Amino acid sequence: MGGQVELRCRCGSVRAAISGVSPRTVNRVVCYCDDCQAFAHQLGRADLLNANGGSDIVQVAPSTLAFVQGQDRIAGVRLSPKGLYRWYASCCNTPVGNTVSPAIPFVGIIAQAFAGGAPAVDDVAGPPIGAILGKYAVGEPPAGSTGLNISLLLRAIGKVLVWKVRGKTWPHPFFQREPREPIYPITVLSREQRDALRPLCGPRPAAQATD
């Protein structure tokens, strides 16, 4: 069944409840992709990245996440016109979820957005089960993060398929059911804005390259 945990932005204005959280019901991975790094830098929240530029992400079914406070502070950004929808609390620039679309039902939530942070997530969801896209990591890629991890991929696909079949897409915390459009305002970054973020990201951030 799993337990209920609280999602809370840094200043406490945005809060949500996430139900049914357990190692069996969620995926937890560390993602080193340059898009996740760019998003953190766009928000001015590089503090959320680990030493190698990784984001500790917990993937949950959309219907298990329900905002209970501060919905008027939620906004979204896409790094490109077809990129992920990356949602955040505009009051303090805390990420509160990444999504593709209702057709692919999952929400990826950074561990620090949970009340109590990563240690609290450990208690209910267990530690990360792997890492992906380590070729973009800052410095030496963590072990096991650079190749294709078939078990992680199959687990992620399996979770999404099960959530879809069991109707866990709706109610969706970020999309209207009809029409299937975002509930909250979206900003799409320009090419110039994206290009300005890339030097901050791995595998060789400009700050390191000039040392």
Image (cartoon, rainbow, N blue to C red):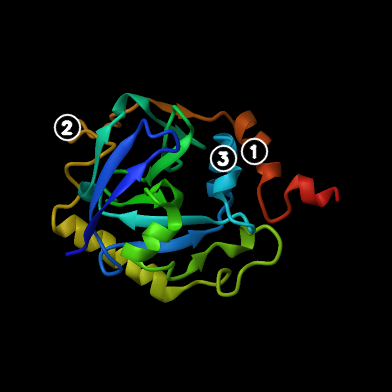
Q: Which mark is residue 45?
A: 3
Residue 163 location (% of width, % of height): 21, 58
Q: In the image as oriented, which residue stretches furthest toward the right?
A: 211
Disc nearest the viewer among 3 and 1: 3
- Identify the residue at horizontal 21%, vertical 33% (top origin): 176
Pointer 3 or 1: first along the chain:
3
**Quadrant of the rendered structure where residue 89 is?**
top left
Q: Disc 1 marks which residue?
A: 197
Q: Residue at x 85, y 48 (%)?
A: 210
Are the residues flagged by discs 3 and 1 in contact, CB closer than 8 Å? Answer: no
Please report the residue visible at 33 percent of the width from the left and 28 percent of the height from the top.
184
Q: Is residue 99 left or right of residue 35?
A: left
Q: Residue 198's quadrant in the figure? A: top right
Give the residue number, with chain letter if any, for mark 2: 178
The residue drawn where x is 48% and y is 33% is: 93
Q: Which of the two discs, 3 and 2, sits closer to the camera?
A: 3
Q: Amino acid at mark 3?
A: Arg
| Residue at mark 3 to residue at mark 2: CA–CA distance | 33 Å
